[in-house]
Image (cartoon, grey):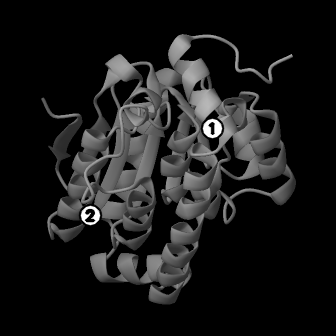
Amino acid sequence: MSLIRTERQGAVARLLLDSPANRNALSAQLRAELYQALRDAGDDDGVRSIVLGHTGPVFCAGADLKEMRSGPPAPDTPTVAQILAEIWRTPKPVVAALAGAARAGGLGLVAACDIVIASDTISFACTEVRIGVIPAVISAVLAPRMSPAAMHQLFLTAEPFSAQWAQQAGLVELIVQPEQLDTETRRITDAFALAAPGALAGTKRLTRSAKAIADLETRLGDLEQLSTRYFESAEGREGLAAFAAKRPPSWAC
């Protein structure tokens, strides 16, 4: 069963994370399908914009921690870093439409997008420190968006923050009431449809140039290695074990 639902609405490609049973966690299958769907939409001349959305009450819970305990994925499975770079690289504007919460690695997907529209009822959190690891990879795309102080607070506390806070911090462009999310998303994609495709792609390259993407990929590669070291550390192993056993980790007071 596919974990990415692809819908075509005129010139808009809607890519929906469709694994609500595990809160749309970034499993190997979901990553592979999302990466391919992004590439397909980017290569389709009939697509003028891409909307990244979701089914279920959560946009994305981050890494699939249960799957991680079962062993490494196949060597050719796309990583989160590759997906973030692909969102940056695609010439089409990518809109995140969030009706549900984003956690941990899910914030990376949000931050990589060009425009973020969020329901005013949702929350955001980076919870990595509570399982003994750090938000390494996603920091590469969060840093260009958020104020340093806000990102510092987000990473250190692991506390959930409102959509309003996320907007003030620079992560979210537009906040709407839940029933207005589709209408506001359509307003943005309709605006993109009025723009010349080449000019739109060129405008995106003003800030996401080939050099910027290459620099991002280099940074992501370094951060992936850093993230791996933390997951393989004693604290990382204890954090994953505690998560699986649904118990507090040994360091919790």
Report the residue at 39% width, 63% height from top.
Answer: 82
* Three-letter code, disc 1: Gly
Q: Is residue 18 left or right of residue 172?
A: left
> Where's the C terminus, which quadrant?
top right
* Three-letter code, disc 2: Arg
In front: mark 1 or mark 2?
1
Where is residue 64? Give x, y as percent.
42, 33
Find out whether the residues at labels 1 and 2 contact each other: C-beta distance under 8 Å.
no
N-terminal label among 1 and 2: 2
Report the residue at 34% width, 73% height from top.
Answer: 91
Give the residue at mark 2.
Answer: 48
Depth check: give the residue in front, 113 or 34.
34
Where is residue 237? Give x, y as percent.
59, 34
Count neighbours of disc 1 (C-alpha within 10 A) and say few if under 14, some if 14 to 19, many if 20 or more.
Answer: many
Q: Is residue 126 visible?
A: no
SS at mark 2 in the image: loop
Give the residue at mark 1.
Answer: 236
SS at mark 1 in the image: helix
Disc 1/disc 2 C-alpha distance (Å)? 42 Å
